[in-house]
Every structure is written in C-alpha cells, then in structure tokens.
Amino acid sequence: MTGPKETAWSDFLAALEEQEGPQGIDVLTAITAEVPGSAVASGRARLLDAVASGGRLWRFDEKVAALLDITREAARQLLDLLDTTAIWEHPMPGVSIYWVTGGPRVEGALCGFLRISPGMRFPEHEHLGDETVLVLQGGMLDPDTGTVVRPGEYDQRKIGTSHVVAVPEGGVDLLMLAVVFDGLSVHGIRITPKR
C-alpha cells in the first residue's frame, strides 16, 4: 500500500542521499554509524523498508493485534495514534496512559498503552489478574532483578504478583501495551475495567 505519507518519506530519503559529498552529510550512514561495517548496508535497507512499509510502529502490528484480539488494520490505526499528544491521559508526572478496548478474548481486562519518561517509575502495583506487557519502544526495567525488557519482547506477571516499572535514565520514553485481567491495585486503590 502506498500513499502520500510513503511517497513523502521516499522523496525525503532520496533528497538526503543526493546531499552526499564533500559539502554534504550521508545521513543514512550517520544514522547507522554505530553499527559494525557489514551491518550498515543491511541497516540502511531495513530503514528504507520500514519507511516504505508504513507507520513507525507497524512492525508490532501482529503482536498488538494478537494481544488485544483485534485485526492488524485496527492495530495499525492504534499504533499510528500513539504519536498524537491529545489521546494521552496524565495520571502522574512522567506517566501517560491511553486506554483502549480489545476484542472478546480480553473482555474483562484493563487494556492500555503507557508512556513513561526516562528516569521515571510506575509505582509498585499488585495484579488482580494475569498481566501481559508488550514493549514497543525504550526499555522496561525491573529494579529488583535488573532485567530490561526491550522492544518486541513480552513481560508476563501472574495474579497476586507486584512490581515496579522503571525506565532507565538517559534513554527514550518507554512505550508499552499492557493487558491486565481484572485490573490492578496501586497504593490500595483498585483500578478495574469498566464493565
């Protein structure tokens, strides 16, 4: 599927490539400067492929669709909205939430995207049901174990468990999708799905 967005990106990247030379900068090489030599070409190809194939988070559409029990097209629409500032609620400093409704398999679950700023934490909370988190951007740090969950990876917690979600300093915002059956409890306040 091509459209104005993809064409504009293609034109933009073509213009960047034309600026190579003694007076210009090869921006695509600069982007992959930290990548070992043989991986630069494949990194450039992946970047061009990602731009041509849709939204910046579309690589997660299949996982988001499966987790929320929705179509891939609906998942892509949700993923495209995540860069829109107007959708987010801000319940605490450094934490934003965008609640969504999933399909029949996740009925009775809290479903939402969370954005947490670097160096910030989502406070300790207890799961009233099983939880599955999919990280889309940044890293989700478990301060107790030092484990970091990265983009495309899942973190699963069982009913009755509790933990803190932290974001490493100096990185990018953590962006994740959480599905928590029956809700959660934060400082004794129960957050449950609307029925």
Image (spheres, grey):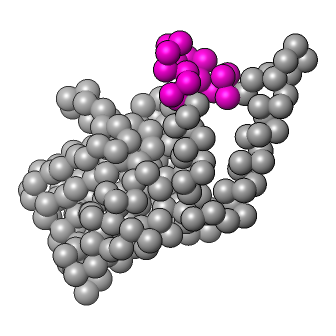
Instruction: Look at the picture and state if 158 lies above or below 146.
Output: below
Task: Please name the predominant secondary structure of the magenta segment in the image.
Answer: helix
Q: Position of residue 33 (x, y in %)?
A: 60, 18
Q: Is residue 82 left or right of residue 60?
A: right
Looking at this rendering, what residue extends furthest in the bottom direction?
195
**In terms of depth relative to the viewer, which is nearer, 59 or 102?**
59
Residue at the image position 25 percent from the left and 87 percent from the top: 195
Q: Number of labelled discs? A: 0
Q: Is residue 2 left or right of residue 70?
A: right
Residue at the image position 72 percent from the left and 56 percent from the top: 7
Q: Position of residue 148 (x, y in %)?
A: 30, 32
Residue at the image position 67 percent from the left and 28 percent from the top: 28
Residue 36 in magenta stretch: yes
Residue 24 visible in this rendered orientation of the protein: yes
Q: Is residue 79 left or right of residue 66?
A: right
Residue 119 in magenta stretch: no
Q: Position of residue 47 (x, y in %)?
A: 57, 38
Query: Where are the magenta residues, as a range?
Result: 28-43
Q: Quadrant of the rendered structure where residue 179 is? A: bottom left
**In terms of depth relative to the viewer, which is nearer, 20 or 138?**
20
